[in-house]
Amino acid sequence: MKIRDILKAIGQNISLSKEELEREVKISTDTRTIKSGDFYLPLKGASFDGEKFIEQALEKGAVGAFCTDDRKYNALTIKVPDTLTTYLQLANYRRNQINPTVVAITGSSGKTTTKELVASVLEEHFKTFKTPLNHNNEIGFCQTIFEMPVDTEVLVLEMGMRGLGEIELLSKYAEPDITIISNVGTAHIGRLGSRENIAKAKCEIVKYQRGKYFIAHNDELIKKTVDFDGEKIFYSISDVKILEKDAHYSKFEYQDNVYELNVGGDYNIENALSAINTGLKLGMDVSEIQNGLKKYHPIEKRWEGVNAGGYEIINDSYNANPESMRAFVDTIFEHYNDYVLILGDMGELGENEVKYHKELGQYIATHKNFKQETKVISVGTLSKNITDEIPNAEHFDSIEKVVPFIKSDINNKTTIFLKASRSMKFEKIIDLLKTGN
């Protein structure tokens, strides 16, 4: 950005020479990677204060810095009330300079997969940029905007939240054209207290929406909560006819057209419906959407098919909450025969965490497709409450203990399905099976 653009973005007017105003700089928030000619923006957190490193940034060649106090430095300094707000203002300015169509996505689960599916579809027709990995908070949003190429036509943003007001803040500076809510579940219920509050937090995504399309899972709570005057499109698995299905492939019919995915799981099909509707509303041909979906491949730990030590493993341990666990179980029970379920702890469920784990165990044990020979294993602490409710289930308190059991008691022709919160680090199961340790 030019210095004059920075001042315009934050609403300040500083007397500088024309040469200084026209100087182009890169905004940097990290003194470890700052380069000569950059402009330093110090961020603050619970355990760090970037303003303590302004001198260091200048010594490394930064041409200036933002600050919140009146200290004097031997370089251009711009005083602001809050540096994170400044970062968001600058990101919003650049968002509007490039002016792509912005597709914003949130949800209790499935938002990263939905983002990847939507981007895979839109890349067939538009120059598309997306939130990298899961950089879905305020800082990640700003980083995404500044990494976005100047010729971007569509920007696909993932928006995460841990409390009320956070998605509204992201919406304010993203100004989305299309918004998507993949679902409203119980993730973060320990902080928000109820699904109603979670729905309220998710529906903040439309607060500053500029465009006219809202796309969401067909949930009565979303319908009741969202305050949006534009066109609302709701979808669910009941809208499709599944034609073929296995661990790595789905073929389904939706609105008289047939689509394919190189991934299994009913919830992946549901997430694909939001991508289909986004493509259609942006004027794409059905054939382009079909191609985009077929090119999609799951990111690591999301319905990821791997072979480890001779075992076929489906790893969906990127995250877990009661709703995604139930959807996971439904898909496996309905479409697979010879399998083992290995389930881990679900995180961030608050004071009712034991209850939610017990209810999942009861759901599995009373499922219409549950068979007595179904092998269910839990690993962790809270997950014991799952298998305590299931006949003939096994529990292990650590990954190191479950791996020898897999090797000695599970036939390597059996497909193993893994599901847990990210904190459980279930990828270690795969690593240990691969190395043979």
Image (spheres, helix red, strand yellow):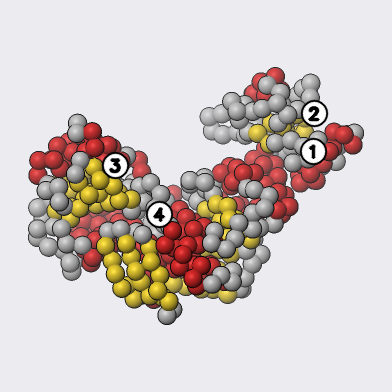
Q: Nearer the viewer, mark 4 or mark 1?
A: 4
State left or right for residue 150 relative to residue 312. Answer: right
Q: Amino acid at mark 1?
A: Ile
N-term-proximal mark, 2 vs 3: 2
Tag shown at residue 91: none
Q: Quadrant of residue 52?
A: top right
Alpha carbon distance from label 2 to label 3: 49 Å
Q: Is residue 398 above or below residue 250?
A: above
Residue 288 appears in the picture as rendered = yes
Q: Amino acid at mark 2?
A: Leu
Q: Secondary structure at mark 3?
A: loop
Residue under label 3:
426
Q: Nearer the viewer, mark 4 or mark 2?
A: 4
Q: Label 3 neighbourhood size at 10 Å, few (<14), some (14-19), many (20+)? A: many
Residue under label 2:
76
Where's residue 331, x and y in %? Answer: 27, 63
Q: Label 2 neighbourhood size at 10 Å, few (<14), some (14-19), many (20+)? A: some
